[in-house]
Image: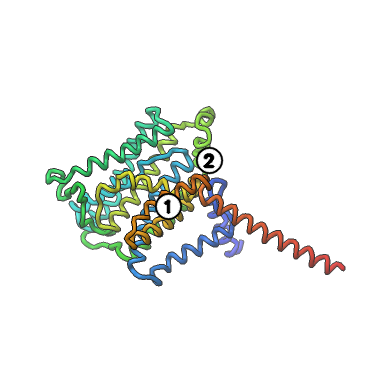
Amino acid sequence: MTKTQSITGKIKHALSLITGPNTYGNTKLFWGAFAIAVAMLLLYPQFTNPWAVNNMARYFTLAFLALSLAVIWGFSGILSFGQVAFFGIAGYAFGVVTFNYGSATGITAAIFVAVFVGTLFSLILGYFMFYGGVRDVYVTIITLVVAIVLYTFMSQTAGSEWAIGDARLGGYNGMPGITDITLGIGEAGFVLEGNRFYYATLLTLIGVYLLLRILVNSSYGMTMVAIREDEQRTATFGYNVTFIKLMVFTLGGAIASLGGVFYVSWGNYIDPSVFSITFAALPVVWVTVGGRDSLIGAIAATIIIERISTELAATGTEWALVLVGGLMMFVILVMPAGAAQYVDRAVGYITRSISDDSGSIRNIREEINDD
């Protein structure tokens, strides 16, 4: 086997892992467009101003939240309004640890501690819900209530008694001055700020996206989809449905927690608004618009909607939330499956048309040559 054949074989093997019936975009055309989009995003900081780069990095942090919901709702049928709970808890945990341990080692450890705390909370919440027999719309209600409870609780932590070591929770005023993510040991570290932070969030987001593609196209992902389609029938085949739902819910919590760490590092600040109903509803809007069973759709919808909201907010109007709500209503009524499915159909139609035209032209040429 030549070196070229070996590389080609590895590429085909890698593609076989991240493509499958449970994801949109399994064609060469998609991966070509994906590569171009990634290249453009990598070059983006070189052709725009720091303000735009900073905003784009914020959209990336929010896209983790969208992915966390897409994987549990779109592939397992669990609609959660509580992803912001894990997002916010991880953000607060990162702030608390970094205020108490400000060295590079402390901040590096804070990343893992924060993700662990957020993930653990989702595991505990999921355990009591799923093993307690909570299903369907009641999961949605409970997760929303959890977010509201956290919002109420954190809002009343303004007093000096609400402090963990050197970290004051701050109530409505939140926790300002949270440090940037720093990777290192001792006092020497690699600080993720500016373009470094942008690239770190982008590359991590791409990595999480590709890993989720592998998951949902694996045999485990097939079981997740089976649970979404018919939970009781899946159980009759011997699958531990409750355990699988718990694991998927916990995975969603871990992804949201990772996004929460990036989010507080982006703004160097966190307050109880991350648990608010308005913020809790945004991931549902992003995933609904992008397509519940489309990971790439969830990311794209998050970036586009948040970009539009930012532009509207910059004009001083109050139309951003109206637009987001109107967009969600439009999608629910006109495109209930989300935009990704329609884009996929349109691309498939165009591809087939081009292929048919090429075939017709080839046939005509062959007939002319025969004559």
Determine whether, in the image, residue 23 is placed left or right of residue 157. right
Which percent across, then down, holds residue 133? Answer: 40, 27
Examine the image and state in which quarter residue 152 appears.
Answer: top left
Amino acid type of the residue that numbered disc 1 sits on in the rendered structure: Val
Q: Are marks 2 and 1 in contact (CB under 8 Å)?
A: no
Q: What numbered label is drawn on residue 222?
A: 2
**Badge 1 element:** helix
Taking the spot 34% from the left edge, 48% from the top edge, the residue there is 279
Taking the spot 57% from the left edge, 56% from the top edge, the residue there is 12
Determine whether, in the image, residue 154 is placed left or right of residue 254. left
Structural distance between the alpha carbons of marks 2 and 1: 19 Å
Quadrant of the image for the C terminus?
bottom right
Q: What numbered label is drawn on residue 41?
A: none
Residue count near mark 1 (Cα–Cα under 10 Å), binned few <14, some 14–19, many ≥20: some
Nearest the viewer among 25 and 349 is 349
Residue identifier under label 1: 208
